[in-house]
Image: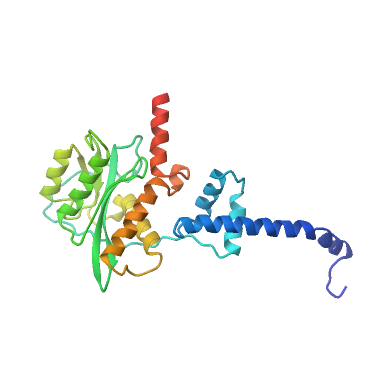
Amino acid sequence: QILEVSRSGFYRWRAAAAARAERARADQELAERIRGIHDDSDGTYGSPRVTAELRDAGLEVNHKRVERVMREHGIVGVHLRKTVRTTVPDPDAVAVPDLIRRDFTASAPNTRYVGDITYLPIGDGQFLYLATVLDLHSKLLAGWSIADHMRTELVTDALRAAAAVRGADGLVGAVFHSDNGAQYASAEFADVCRELGVTRSRGAVGTSADNAAAESFNATLKRETLQGKKRWNSAGEARAAVFRWVTRYNTRRRHSTLGQICPIEYEQRSATLATAA
């Protein structure tokens, strides 16, 4: 009466003590498995990707339970923040049509790509620069390049790297979409695209949404590698962190738009389905 608890409610609570203890034990065991997955992802995975990992390991678990256990144990994935733009438009650039028109999808691999340049902060106000070539079908990072400058060779090196990854025919027939940065609008970049058989595409000047897929990828990379830090201690440390993350991104990191599988596995499944058809 003093605690304002009914007699029947008290006895139900006492009878369920064993079940509560078992649930607590099971939650603790689950939390340990979640923490292992979280640590293995360098602290980047949130509940959707953790749930997918657990299910792939054969554990039937509800995503709401995973969310609850992560919340109760203070296990938090990385959240994205807005990136800083590095685009410097070339006012004298020859116009190139927008062949993507904000449709960041592709029906097959090696047909439509997006690319961008982002900065990697190091030391006391110094930077490296990263150029990317991202396949819109599988989200595979097919090519990339890091340098301490933003000359055109930064983006041509990334494009050549993607052509090498794609094998015999490289990028022949593929569309490559970018913003209107001076590197992508240069005659040198146009020459390399012709050499590789790539069709250029560019969005409108000053409109970040026209290249949102590339900018989103770069923001994800920096957020998951820096994890709240303002910079890396050295260029070597930055290069190693990016190389490690890119390798995991292509081969292991789960992607929500791909059904929680990694880009390489998605391409392999697509190839199997195409062969079967």
Above or below, comparing residue 216 to residue 165 in the picture: below
Q: Say left or right for 169 vs 34.
A: left
Q: Is residue 216 visible?
A: no
Residue situated in front as seen by the camera: 12 or 57: 57
- Is the image coloured rainbow, by chain, by secondary structure, or in one colour? rainbow
Q: Residue furthest bottom?
A: 2
Which quadrant: the C terminus?
Answer: top left
Residue 257 coordinates in the image, percent (x, y):
44, 45
**In which quadrant of the rendered view does residue 32 lie?**
bottom right
Q: Residue furthest top?
A: 277
For image coordinates 12% across by 43% down, the residue present is 191
Above or below, comparing residue 57 to residue 32 in the picture: above
For image coordinates 51% across by 62% down, the residue present is 76
Residue 175 coordinates in the image, percent (x, y):
24, 40
Residue 63 coordinates in the image, percent (x, y):
58, 51
Residue situated in front as seen by the camera: 231 or 204: 231
Above or below, comparing residue 133 to residue 91 in the picture: above
Q: Is residue 260 visible?
A: yes
Report the number of numbered marks.
0
